[in-house]
Every structure is written in C-alpha cells, then in structure tokens.
Image: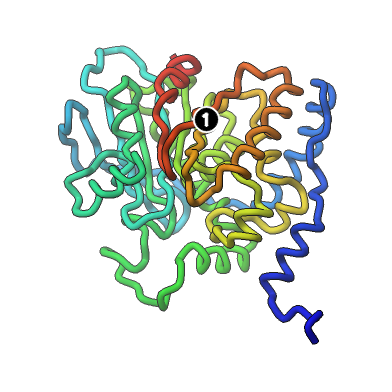
Amino acid sequence: MFERNLSPLSMFGAYARDFSPQYLFDGQTCEDFEKWKTAALPRVLKTLGEFPPSAPVNPELVVEWQHDGLKKQRWYIDVAKNISATLQINFPGNLKSGKKYPAILCCHGHGEFGKDPVMGNDEVPGVKNDIQTFNYNYGHEMAKAGFITFAIDWIGFGERNDSKKPNFRNQDRGRDWCNIYYLQATMLGMTSLSINVAHAKAATGFVCTLPEVNAEKLGVMGLSGGGTMSLWISLCDDRIKATEIIGYSDLWRAFLFRDVYCCGMQVAPGLFRLVELPELQGLLAPRPLLIDIGIHDQCFKIDTAMACFKRLQKIYDAAGATDKLELDLANTAHAWCNHKSKKFFGKYLG
C-alpha cells in the first residue's frame, strides 16, 4: 500500500518528468535550425485549433482625452463574429503632422483590471497599486517614449470579464474564467489562445489603418499572461517585427506540472508533446526578441527561468541570430524590468 500513489497531481508530475517533447532542439547550425523550425512550427500552430470566424471591425470612437502629456483614445471594435472589445490607443504628445510612428501592442496579464494598468489609467480605483507592484504601465511609458501603443482586454479580463459590469454573469461559481473558456473553446475545436490571438490580430489590423501608424513597424510586449500572448501573437502574425516577453520564461515541467501555476489562457492540447517553452520561444528566431527575467520572481523561479533562457540562446545561436536575442535580468520580482525596452524597440522599429 505504501508504494501505491493515489495522487493524480503526482501522476502528472511523473509523466512530465519522464516525457521528452518531440521537437526539443539539439542542433548547432543554421541548417539544423531551419530544418527544425520547418518541421516544428506548423505542428505547434496546429495545437491552437481553429480560429473564430472573423467579422468587419466596425470601429466606433467613444472618447479622446489628454493624460500626462499623451493623447488617449477609447474605441469599440468587433474583433470576431459575436464579440467586441474595447480598444485603447495611446499617442505620444508631440505627434508631427504627416509622420507615421511605430506601434506596439501592449498585452496585459492576469489581474482584475485587464488593460487599464498597462495603459496607465491610474484614475481607476486599485490600478495604481497594480502599476506599482508590477511596474505595469508599459503601454503608458512606451507612448511617452515616442511609440503609439494599443491594447484590448483578453476574454475574461477587464471589461470582458463576465462577472463584472457590464456583463454581471455569475456562472463562474468562484472558478477562473480562463479555465471555463478553455473548456468551452476546446469543445468547439478552438482554444482560448486562438480566440485571443484572433482578437489581437483584428485590433492590430484596425490600428494599422490609422494615418499616424507605420504598419511596417509593429512590435508586441507583455507581462506574465501578457508574455504568453506576446509570444503566440508573434508566432501567428508576421507583421510583428520585434517582441518583448516579460516574466514568462520557465520550463513547463516546472511551473505547470510541479508548481501548478498555469491556466487555460496559456495552453493548447498536445503542446508539451511537441516542445518545451524555450523551443516555443525559439521558433521566433531570427526575429528580434527581448526577454525580461526578475531575479526574485515568485511566479517563475529564477533557476528554471535561466535554464529556459540558456536553451533559447542555443537556438538563436544556431539560427545565426545571436545579436537579435537580448536579456534584461533585473533585481526585481514579477515585473517589467524596463532597462532595455525603449532602446530595443527603438533599434528594431525606429
């Protein structure tokens, strides 16, 4: 009896420890990299399932205001059939007439307020605390640095949280909407990731039509769950020229199977059978990638976070893109490091 295991969690952990994903990278040359990426990327993207049916964007400008030297706009857009999103756009305060500016999609992570802290809406009660805790207002700060920034709420967050105004649904019964949506999505042949990626692409497409935006110079950045989204959006959208992943470097066998620190917003069926997280990040090569790691991050522990980055380095080296991969390693917890972002996006987006 003492040798029997009655814990399903221990069972999954044992499976993960004994399992080796099919497309772990072990090459050294550009030829090795190209062969690996050609084989792995289509299968990885297939795990997302189907994307939701598209719809005309039907943009509606709700309000424009000034805040801390920035011009900010709030729009309603239809991001897919049967679903809309609130889009916020932050413009630098010194816009020059006739000039087009690079734009950065700023992805929020988990939290009550969705895009509000990221975009610097610190008048909303409670948002200031999130900004201070996670150094979270990169959509505000990057606009002050001269980039146009934009953001929407992912499904289940901010204004698209079914428990909050204007929805006021209570079917969650205290559960995480991420997991509920994931179950519903997979029953329909989709995933939460494919839905959110589709919504991000719709928002990006609309922003690219604005006269102030240079559609050839697009970037994406995000913290935690926003790092997940930044990675997948970049994999699925070739318009993205530079990516910053903040606080989302680790090994799935550690943070998912050991620490159980994951949700339906971050996973796709069969993904771990194909790749580990450093390989998923490495599929971005040779595109420019900035990784933020906090030494005291309690969500993604530093030992496995650095193990992830070192494996990622080997992939970028093999791809002949060593100079395109950067690390911002900082004496922070789970937060935006903000030492290299402005220079990184300035270099690759102009």
Any part of residue 205 in sight: no
Percent x, y for residue 26? 82, 34
Local packing at callout 1 (Cα closer than 10 Å; few below 14, some 14-19, many 20+) is: many
Residue 344 falls left or right of residue 146: right
**What kind of residue is marked 1?**
Thr
**Front position in the image: 235 or 76:** 235
Task: Identify the secondary structure beneath mark 1.
Answer: strand
Query: Which residue is disc 1 drawn over?
Result: 243
Percent x, y for residue 277? 66, 44
Q: How many marks?
A: 1
Query: Toward which corner of the image does residue 138 lie, by quadrant?
Result: top left
Q: At 54% across and 27% down in the image, what residue appears?
A: 327
Query: Toward which corner of the image does residue 311 lie, by quadrant?
Result: top right
**Front position in the image: 298 or 92:** 298
Which part of the image, by quadrant, shows the N terminus? bottom right
Residue 271 drawn above or below residue 182: above
Percent x, y for residue 12? 72, 67
Residue 247 falls left or right of residue 20: left
Residue 348 drawn above or below residue 225: above
Q: At 43% across and 14% down in the image, what residue appears?
A: 350
